[in-house]
Image: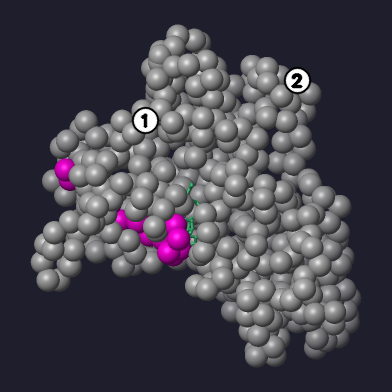
Amino acid sequence: MLRKLLLRTSAARRSLSGAGASGSRVLPDRRPSPSLSPSPRGPASRFYASASSQVPGGTFVEHVDDGGADGPTSRPSAAISVDRSALCNPPEHSHEPTADSELVKHLKGIIKFRGGPISVAEYMEEVLTNPKAGFYINRDVFGMEGDFITSPEVSQMFGEMIGVWTMCMWEQMGQPSKVNLVELGPGRGTLMADLLRGTSKFKHFTEALHIHMVECSPTLRKLQHSNLKCIEGENVSQDVGHRTISTLAGTPVMWHAALEQVPSGLPTIIIAHEFYDALPIHQFQRASRGWCEKMVDIQEDSSFRFVLSPQPTPANLYLMKRFQWATDEEIEKLNHIEICPTAMDLTQTIAKRISSDGGGALIIDYGQNGVISDSLQAIRKHKFVDILDDPGSADLSAYVDFAAVKHSAEEASEDVSVHGPITQCQFLGALGINFRVEALLQNCTDEQAESLRAGYWQLVGEGEAPFWEGPDEQVPIGMGTRYLVTAIVNKKQGAPIPFS
Ligand code: SAH
């Protein structure tokens, strides 16, 4: 996942975090900020070498033995030989396992009980969110000590800019006196905390907010509670029970396991940053007998392996649906494709909610505006690893198919319009991140200034920062064009900024 490459400069945010609880972690100085239209110089970076591939850390299926064009179709699942030479980092296998982990036992149990392999989607879902042993469930996976770092953790400016967008959206909605602000997959809660700190002076806005955090991990819920500086309030009514209030802006906060559980009836703004990439994807491989789903099975030595389904699976229906949104040319070029039915369904839920309650949703992630071929990757401790190695100990993520998001939303409701995707660089630039960085640079220490510039570059730059004078291994890598932003809004409000 691209976000993990950010680690090299993740010190940026950490060194600013001591600047006080007043909101701004950064204090003033007077230095030029890097240009908003970054033009990377110098030799092609290691980043480009890895990011240019559709297979950033994943497997490349080189050969499928499916029996040939006239071969038997009733064979058991055919094996795929996997070439891992395209990995950007050598795969870091865990030490020889002494015993299977709880999650591995669980996965093997499912495969044995079913009497056959499971889809990559089911594997991914179990690995990430199994309630007992999923990757996200029992620990804080973010930052230097964790497995990867995300934009809100890189710089406070990210959450602040999302705050600007949210306030503008609320104004376009006619400044409703109550608004649901929903975040899907809030991680440590850093984005929401920066959003609240950044907007806390605008009382009309913050007093309207009802925050809803959609989070499956009990560990991360606790961290979010702490980072939002929540306190438990008085019982408001027997139905609602006690209230949790974020003292950052005096706003009520509730937690839910899914968007469907967020109470409807209020105008709603939804933020999904790096949530879609964690949703389970199905992978299909073109074989002589047609499109076959890639599945996860157990081999003789008891390790996992990929196989192809001998006949169509239920996910084929979604594949057909995805193909309807693609051109023949696009499909002809493909030998491998990823589809994300969960993302399609979630987008429909979002579109219907926005349609009935009013408001808008903002989706930010890495991906592309079209069919995704083969992007699934596993990352542990900031390194790409084998997808099937020690499941539950590494993050799994895949590129987001923004074209499918758009089609899903439009299909779900005629009352919503979809805008973008545009690049994160365009989005943050139009919202004024360069003014914000200038303001923060007005009065800060040299160390803070360096961190600010590094963080700024990571959010809006492309490739290695040309201004970097520090150690090579810490050069900030810009992801301003790798991340895309799309908005789904109720048509009543017109086009949202900065898509208008
Ligand atoms: N938005 C955050 C975190 C991204 S990581 C950031 O940018 O820093 C993905 C987040 O989504 C984590 O908080 C994870 O626990 C949560 N998550 C993943 N799958 C989920 C699911 N199916 N339901 C609810 N939360 C989920």
Could one spot residue 329 in this view of the protein? no
Between the residue at mark 2 and the residue at mark 1, the CA separation in whole angstroms equals 37 Å
Is residue 419 left or right of 312 when viewed as pictured? left
Instruction: Please report the residue visible at 75 percent of the width from the left and 20 percent of the height from the top.
Output: 42
Which quadrant: the C terminus?
top left
Residue marked by disc 1: 20
Instruction: Please tell me whether residue 350 is drawn above or below residue 203 in the rendered image.
Output: below
Residue marked by disc 2: 42
Q: Is mark 1 within 8 Å of ligand 1?
A: no
Residue 289 falls in image quadrant: bottom right
Q: Magenta segment range? A: 207-220
Q: Position of residue 54 (x, y in %)?
A: 71, 49
Q: Position of residue 458 (x, y in %)?
A: 57, 31
- Viewer-nearest residue: 398 or 213: 213
Instruction: Please report the residue visible at 58 percent of the width from the left and 63 percent of the height from the top.
Output: 135
Tag 2: residue type?
Answer: Gly
Q: Residues within 10 Å of mark 2 (few under 14, many from 20)?
A: few
Instruction: Please report the residue visible at 44 percent of the width from the left and 57 percent of the height from the top.
Output: 220
